[in-house]
Image (cartoon, rainbow, N blue to C red):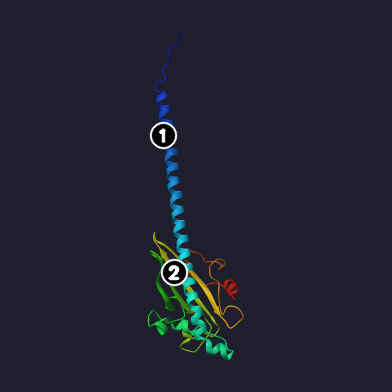
């Protein structure tokens, strides 16, 4: 019969090491799962904000169609180019409400929609302003001379998500639709995304897509 050798607690130490490794692996798996859940939730929130901003863009574009035709009826009849003066002058000129333009930038443009409610707390603001096309001195920001304006929707959704979509919109007396525009930001060029940090205006390559 063989005598048992004194292992001096080696089995216990080995078991503790294995247990520690299993604990670390379990904690890592849990942390990875939690991180993936957080990333998924963040992506969902950003997507919701993007779609809310798209809804804001489409909301004002659709509302502008009939007003654009009505405000430019005399120009269509005379065969001259239509303009967006009514949009740049702002909603107060038509509805006696809203924020009218005070300059030719996003921050000083005409706020046509404030806290448009898509559903619940899915809200958007929509602003328009003129591009740099000259115009009457001292009133350039309300004098559209080329039929092109900027339109931007800023959306915010539950969970802290936000998104901004900015487009160029062109109105012209041509065959087909009198009001054309690119209804989404895909293809908007460098620096354009749904993260609400796209502070630069759309680039030339983007404008060519909405003619």
Q: In this rendering, would 197 be left or right of 208?
A: left
Disc on the earlier residue, 1 or 2 = 1
Residue at the image point whose x is 44% and y is 31% from the top: 18
Residue with the mark numbered 1 = 20
Whether residue 71 is visible, yes or no, is yes
Crowding near the residue tagged with mark 1, few <14, some 14–19, many ≥20 C-alpha atoms within 10 Å: few
Q: How many dots with numbers?
A: 2
Could you say whether the residue bearing mark 1 is in a helix, strand or loop? helix
Percent coordinates x, y for residue 17 in the rendering = 42, 31
Q: CA distance from mark 1 to mark 2?
A: 50 Å
Could you say whether the residue bearing mark 2 is in a helix, strand or loop? strand
Percent coordinates x, y for residue 36 in the rendering = 46, 49
Crowding near the residue tagged with mark 2, few <14, some 14–19, many ≥20 C-alpha atoms within 10 Å: many
Percent coordinates x, y for residue 145 in the rendering = 54, 85
Q: From the viewer's side, name the closer residue of 95 and 46.
A: 95
Which quadrant holds residue 42?
A: bottom left
Residue with the mark numbered 2 = 154
* Labelled disc at residue 12: none
């Amino acid at each position: 019969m063989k005598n048992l050798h004194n292992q001096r607690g080696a089995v216990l130490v080995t078991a503790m090491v294995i247990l520690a490794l299993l604990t670390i692996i379990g904690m890592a798996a849990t942390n990875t799962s939690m991180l993936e859940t957080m990333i998924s939730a963040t992506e969902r929130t950003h997507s919701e904000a993007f779609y809310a901003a798209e809804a804001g863009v489409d909301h004002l574009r659709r509302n502008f169609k009939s007003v654009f035709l009505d405000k430019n009826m005399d120009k269509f009849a005379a065969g001259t180019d239509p303009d967006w003066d009514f949009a740049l002058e702002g909603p107060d000129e038509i509805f006696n409400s809203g924020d009218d333009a005070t300059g030719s930038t996003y921050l000083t443009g005409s706020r046509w929609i404030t806290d448009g409610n898509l559903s619940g707390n899915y809200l958007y603001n929509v602003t328009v302003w003129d591009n740099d096309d000259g115009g009457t001195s001292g009133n350039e920001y309300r004098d559209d001379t080329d039929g092109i304006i900027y339109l931007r929707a800023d959306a915010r959704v539950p969970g802290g998500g936000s998104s901004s979509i900015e487009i160029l919109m062109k109105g012209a007396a041509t065959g087909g639709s009198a009001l054309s525009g690119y209804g989404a930001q895909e293809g908007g060029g460098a620096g354009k995304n749904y993260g609400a940090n796209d502070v630069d205006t759309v680039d030339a390559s983007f404008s060519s897509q909405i003619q």
